[in-house]
Amino acid sequence: MLLSVLPNFLPATAIIPVHAVTQWVSNASRLSMGLRYLDKTLIRPLAIGAIAGALLGAALYSKLPTDYLPLILGLWVLWLTWIPQPRLPIPQKFTFVFLGFYQSAISMALGATGPLGTALLMRHSKDREYLVINTALYMTLSHTCRVAAFTLLGFSFIDWWLELGILCSGAILGSWFGTKIRPYIRQDHALKILKGILTLLALRLIASVVL
């Protein structure tokens, strides 16, 4: 949803780097509010994969056609929203190395990588608190690598300090509020509403390029 809104306020070259910082703050703050559910055995494999993925993703990002980035993002959002994520035949011990790599490499280029990580975590536990907090773990590691990679690529985050300040403040507030209300929300209702909003925003992005 954030990727669908940012093109209204930022130039194409700033969308994904600013998104990376905002998502780092969002996930790190959510992780800090539920550390008792953290699965520490995931940290090493996720970190190894995330670092390798960020290196590859940096190369992909430098080749993106920025004029068509809203179109690419719109199609990507539709794909993530409506197409079932594939089941990949990966040996168990490499599952989370792959997840860290996938998350960092693809999100360096396109920003958001969808629910594949949650699907992999569900093989370990279907407890909602476990899934929310350990999804925040792998996203935090991934976005840390992304921000570092964008910095090395020369992106000047300081030029966007005001936008980042507003977005990150909202992200922390959202993490706090979401943590408080999470036990009271029916997942099936929330998912339907979210899919509808994402679809409308994605179509708006696509229309901004093709019309």
Image: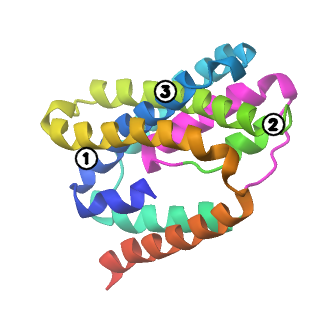
* Pointer 3 residue: 28
Characterize the local packing of mark 3: few (<14), some (14-19) or many (20 or more) Cα atoms within 10 angstroms: many
* Pointer 1 residue: 14
> Residue type at mark 1?
Ala
Say if the magenta span includes residue 104: yes
Residue 12 in view here: yes
Label 1 residue SS: helix
Magenta stretch? 85-112
Characterize the local packing of mark 2: few (<14), some (14-19) or many (20 or more) Cα atoms within 10 angstroms: few
Task: Identify the residue at image location x=63%, y=19%.
Answer: 35
Label 2 residue SS: loop
Which mark is on residue 127? 2
Label 3 residue SS: helix
Residue 73, percent from left and from top: 43, 61
> Residue type at mark 3?
Ala
Characterize the local packing of mark 1: few (<14), some (14-19) or many (20 or more) Cα atoms within 10 angstroms: some
Q: Earlier along the polypeptide chain: callout 1 or callout 2?
A: 1
Instruction: State the separation of the CA atoms marked 1 and 2.
Output: 36 Å
The residue closer to the viewer here, 52 or 45, is 45
Residue 114, percent from left and from top: 61, 51
Question: Which quarter of the figure has residue 6?
Answer: bottom left
Query: In the image, is 125 to the left or to the right of 77?
Result: right
